[in-house]
C-alpha cells in the first residue's frame, strides 16, 4: 500500500481533467456542437427529456502488469495482483457504492465459466467506477455460498452468506474487518437466506422458512439483528419478491418490509402485519422497487403491467402494459419521474405518460440507482442516465428562444466578432439575471469540460452587462466544477454529479478520497476549499507508518515531519499513538516530543513507558494535575511490579515540585 503524497498517474488518453487550476478563460475551447446536436442526444419521455452520458468508455479493466505501477503511484492500496483483465458481469456477483463509489465483484460459483478464462480460486475484486483496479484479495475459503454483496453508507463492503452470516471488508485493502469470522444474523434452524434487500445502513433477510430478520447497524462490529412480526405465509404459498421502505421514511423509525405473497402484498414491521391494496386490481407482483424518497413503489405484475403505487397502496397512480409478462432481471427508479426495467439486452424506461424509451445493450448491465439518476455499468462502459435539467433544456432545446438560449447564442456571436451579439443582448436585457443563472446552473450539470467552459463563458458575457447579479454565484460554481472534474478523472474514478456532491458534502468527499489513499488530491481540494487539511495529513501519516515497516525510524520521522509541519496545531500525539500501536515505540517517542499540548503528550509518554520524561514534561507545563497524574501512574507501577519504593522516592527527590506535591497529598 502506497501512502506517499504523490501525484496520481494520469491516463494518457483524453479524459476529464483532474486539475484544480482555474478554467482558462483566455483559452479557445474546442468547437462545440450546435444546440440541435446537443438536443439530439436526448430522449423524450412524456414531457421530460432524458439523456445517457457516457462517463467512462472503455473501462480501465486491464491486466495486473499494466496497472501495478498506476495503482502504486495513485495510492490505491491493496495491490492489483490477480485482478482480471476484464470483468464479465454475467459471471460475477457485483455491488456498486452510491455517489460514484467503487465496484466490488466476486465470481458467482453457480455460473459456468470457460476453462482457464479465470483463476481457479475466486478472488474479491475492487475497482473504481472507471474500471481502474484498486485491490484484489483471495476469497476466504470454506465459507458458505455467497448470496449477495453490498456497500454500506459508510463505504464498508459487506457480504451476506447463504447461512445468513455477514462478513465485512475494509476498504481499500479488502481485509476482513474486524476479523475473518462471519457474524451470524439469523436464529438457529431458520433454513438460511431465501432473499435479502440492503439499504445504506442495514439489511432485511427473508429466511427459507419465511421469517424476516433485519439489522440496521451493518457497519457495527457487533450488529444486532431482530426478527419482525411473523408474516404467516402458508406452506402452499410462495414469497415472490420483497422490498424495503427505509427507516427514515417510516413514522416509527424502523424499516418496513414489503412482501409479495400470492396475489397480495404484506407490509411487515415490528408492530404487526398489514395486507395492502385489497381494493386494487394488482395481482401477483413479480418485482418491486421503492422510490428514492420512500413514497412510491414500482411493481411489475404477473400479467406484464408496470404499476406505480404509493407505499400505502391507496391508489394506482399509473400503469403501463409491457410487451412481455416475463419479470425483468432488474428494476430501478431513475430519479422520481421514471422507472427502468431491464431484461437481457433490453432496457426500458417508463414514465407517467407517453411512450416509453427503449435502449438496446449487447452485453449485460448493472443498474446502480443514484439520487438523481441511474449509473449503468456494462462490461465496457459506465453511463449515467438522468433527466435533463430545466436549465439545460432552456438553452439547448430545439428552437428555444429563452433568455438563456439567446445569451448562449450571443456569446457565440461575440467570439466570432459578430454584431448579432449585441442584438441578442438587447432582446434579453430585462431577463439577463435569469439567463446568467441558467447558464451557470447548466454548466454545473455537464460532464463535458468543453461544454462547461462554453456555458460559463456565456455567463461571463452576461455578467459584463449585469452588475446586480451576485458574482459569488459564478465563483462558487467554478470552484465546484474544478473539484468535480478532479474526482471524475479516470484514475480517480468518482463520477459525481453536482446534486450528489451537494448531498455528500465536501468533507465527506475528502474522507472518501483519503480512505482510497488519494491523499494528494484530498489535500489539494481541502486547501482549495479552505477546509482544515489536518484530517488528510493525519490519515496520510498513519498510512505511511503502516506501509513503511522496512524504513528506519529516523528516516521515516524526517519524512513525516516534513508533511506534519504543513498543518499548524496538528496532533502529533495521535500519530505517535498509531506508531506505538504499529509496534514502533521508538518512533512514537520521537514523534511525541513534537506535541505542543502537554495534556496529549504526557498520557502518551506514560503509555510507552517514558515515565521519567513524562514527569519532566509535566513539571515544565506547570500543571499540577498532570504532575499528579504522572506521580500516581509511577506509584501504581511500583505497587504492581513490586519494585523498591526507594526507586520512586529517588525519582521525585530530584524534582522539588514533584516531591512537594506528593508530600502535600500524603499528609
Image: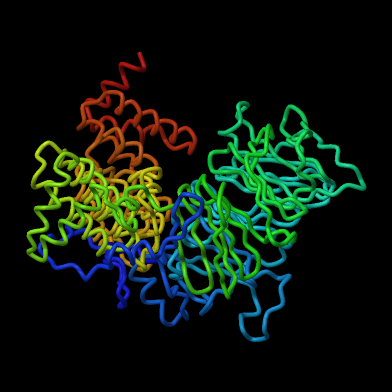
Q: Is residue 551 above or below residue 580?
A: below
Q: Is residue 419 left or right of residue 599?
A: left
Where does the image place residue 137, in percent across and percent down from the top left?
55, 68
In the image, taking residue 269 as reference, residue 390 lies left or right, namely: left
Q: Residue furthest bottom?
A: 116
Displayed quadrant of residue 147: bottom right
Asked if one can make out residue 586 in the rendered structure from this viewpoint, the answer is no
Q: Position of residue 633 (x, y in %)?
A: 40, 32
Number of numbered discs visible in the structure rendering: 0
Q: Position of residue 130 (x, y in %)?
A: 43, 67
The residue positioned 11% from the left and 66% from the top of the image is 416
Looking at this view, name the residue that lies furthest to the top. Answer: 667
Q: Nearer the viewer, residue 206 or 596?
A: 206
Q: Quadrant of the N terminus?
A: bottom left
Q: Closer to the camera, 171 or 627?
A: 171
222 lies left or right of 397: right
Q: Nearer the viewer, residue 122 or 46?
A: 46
| Image quarter (top left, top right, bottom left or bottom right) of the C terminus | top left
Q: Which residue is depicted at the point 21% across and 51% down?
A: 478
Horizontal side, residue 386 vs residue 568: left or right = right
| Viewer-proximal residue among 519 and 262 | 262
Residue in the picture at 15% in, 52% down: 424
The answer to which image quadrant residue 607 occupies is: top left
Residue 396 visible, this angle: yes
* Residue found 33% across the figure and 49% down from its top: 575
Counting from the top left corner in percent of width and height, residue 489 is at 33, 65
Amino acid at each position: 500500500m502506497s501512502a506517499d503524497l504523490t501525484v496520481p498517474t494520469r491516463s494518457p488518453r483524453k479524459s476529464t481533467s483532474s486539475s484544480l487550476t482555474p478554467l482558462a478563460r483566455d483559452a479557445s475551447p474546442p468547437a462545440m456542437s450546435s444546440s440541435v446536436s446537443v438536443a439530439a442526444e436526448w430522449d423524450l419521455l412524456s414531457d421530460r427529456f432524458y439523456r445517457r452520458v457516457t462517463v467512462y468508455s472503455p473501462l480501465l479493466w486491464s491486466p495486473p502488469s499494466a496497472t501495478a505501477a498506476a495503482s502504486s503511484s495513485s495510492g490505491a492500496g491493496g495491490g492489483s495482483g490477480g485482478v482480471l483483465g476484464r470483468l464479465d458481469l454475467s459471471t460475477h456477483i457485483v455491488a456498486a457504492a452510491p455517489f460514484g463509489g467503487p465496484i466490488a465483484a466476486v465470481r458467482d460459483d453457480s455460473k459456468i465459466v470457460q476453462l482457464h478464462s479465470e483463476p481457479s480460486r475466486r478472488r474479491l475484486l475492487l475497482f473504481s467506477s472507471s474500471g481502474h483496479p484498486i485491490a484484489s484479495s483471495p476469497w476466504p475459503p470454506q465459507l458458505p455460498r455467497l448470496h449477495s454483496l453490498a456497500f454500506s453508507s459508510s463505504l464498508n463492503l459487506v457480504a451476506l452468506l447463504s447461512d445468513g452470516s455477514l462478513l465485512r471488508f475494509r476498504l481499500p485493502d479488502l481485509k476482513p474487518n474486524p476479523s475473518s469470522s462471519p457474524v451470524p444474523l439469523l436464529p438457529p434452524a431458520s433454513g438460511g437466506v431465501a432473499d435479502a434487500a440492503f439499504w445504506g445502513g442495514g439489511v432485511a433477510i427473508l429466511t427459507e422458512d419465511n421469517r424476516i430478520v433485519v439489522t440496521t447497524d451493518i457497519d457495527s462490529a457487533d450488529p444486532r439483528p431482530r426478527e419482525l412480526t411473523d408474516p404467516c405465509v402458508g406452506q402452499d404459498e410462495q414469497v415472490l419478491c420483497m422490498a424495503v421502505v427505509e427507516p427514515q421514511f417510516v413514522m416509527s423509525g424502523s424499516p418496513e418490509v414489503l412482501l409479495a405473497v400470492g396475489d397480495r402484498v404484506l407490509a411487515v414491521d415490528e408492530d404487526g402485519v398489514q395486507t395492502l391494496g385489497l381494493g386494487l386490481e394488482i395481482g401477483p407482483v413479480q418485482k418491486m422497487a421503492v422510490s428514492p424518497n420512500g413514497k412510491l413503489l414500482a411493481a411489475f405484475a404477473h400479467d406484464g403491467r408496470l404499476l406505480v403505487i404509493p407505499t400505502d397502496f391507496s391508489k394506482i397512480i399509473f400503469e403501463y402494459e409491457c410487451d412481455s409478462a416475463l419479470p425483468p432481471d432488474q428494476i430501478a427508479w431513475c430519479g422520481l419521474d421514471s422507472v427502468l426495467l431491464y431484461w437481457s439486452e433490453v432496457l426500458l424506461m417508463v414514465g407517467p405518460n407517453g411512450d416509453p424509451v427503449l435502449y438496446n445493450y449487447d452485453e449485460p448491465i448493472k443498474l446502480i440507482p443514484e439520487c438523481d439518476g441511474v449509473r449503468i455499468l456494462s462490461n465496457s462502459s459506465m453511463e449515467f442516465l438522468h433527466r435533463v435539467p430545466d436549465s439545460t433544456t432552456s438553452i439547448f432545446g430545439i428552437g428555444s428562444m429563452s433568455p438563456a438560449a439567446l445569451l448562449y447564442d450571443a456569446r457565440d456571436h461575440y467570439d466570432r466578432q459578430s454584431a448579432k451579439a449585441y442584438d441578442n443582448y438587447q432582446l434579453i436585457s430585462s431577463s439577463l439575471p435569469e439567463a446568467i443563472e441558467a447558464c451557470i446552473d447548466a454548466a454545473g450539470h455537464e460532464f463535458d469540460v468543453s461544454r462547461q467552459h462554453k456555458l460559463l463563458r456565456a455567463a461571463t458575457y452576461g455578467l459584463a452587462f449585469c452588475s446586480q447579479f451576485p458574482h459569488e454565484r459564478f465563483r462558487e460554481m467554478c470552484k465546484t466544477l474544478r473539484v468535480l472534474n478532479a474526482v471524475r478523472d479516470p484514475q480517480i474514478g468518482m463520477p459525481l454529479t453536482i446534486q450528489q456532491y451537494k448531498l455528500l458534502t465536501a468533507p465527506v468527499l475528502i474522507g472518501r478520497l483519503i480512505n482510497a489513499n488519494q491523499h494528494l488530491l484530498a489535500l489539494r481540494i481541502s486547501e482549495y476549499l479552505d477546509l482544515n487539511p489536518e484530517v488528510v495529513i493525519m490519515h496520510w501519516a498513519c498510512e505511511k507508518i503502516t506501509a513503511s515497516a522496512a524504513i528506519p525510524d529516523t528516516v521515516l520521522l524526517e519524512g513525516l515531519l516534513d508533511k506534519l509541519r504543513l498543518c499548524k496545531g496538528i496532533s502529533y500525539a495521535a500519530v505517535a499513538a498509531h506508531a506505538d500501536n504499529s509496534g514502533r515505540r521508538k518512533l512514537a517517542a520521537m514523534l511525541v516530543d513534537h506535541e505542543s499540548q502537554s495534556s496529549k503528550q504526557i498520557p502518551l509518554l506514560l503509555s510507552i513507558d517514558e515515565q521519567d520524561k513524562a514527569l519532566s514534561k509535566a513539571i515544565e507545563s506547570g500543571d499540577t494535575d498532570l504532575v499528579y497524574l504522572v506521580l500516581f501512574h509511577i506509584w501504581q507501577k511500583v505497587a504492581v511490579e513490586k519494585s523498591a519504593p526507594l526507586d520512586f522516592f529517588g525519582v521525585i527527590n530530584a524534582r522539588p515540585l514533584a516531591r512537594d506535591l506528593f508530600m502535600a497529598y500524603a499528609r
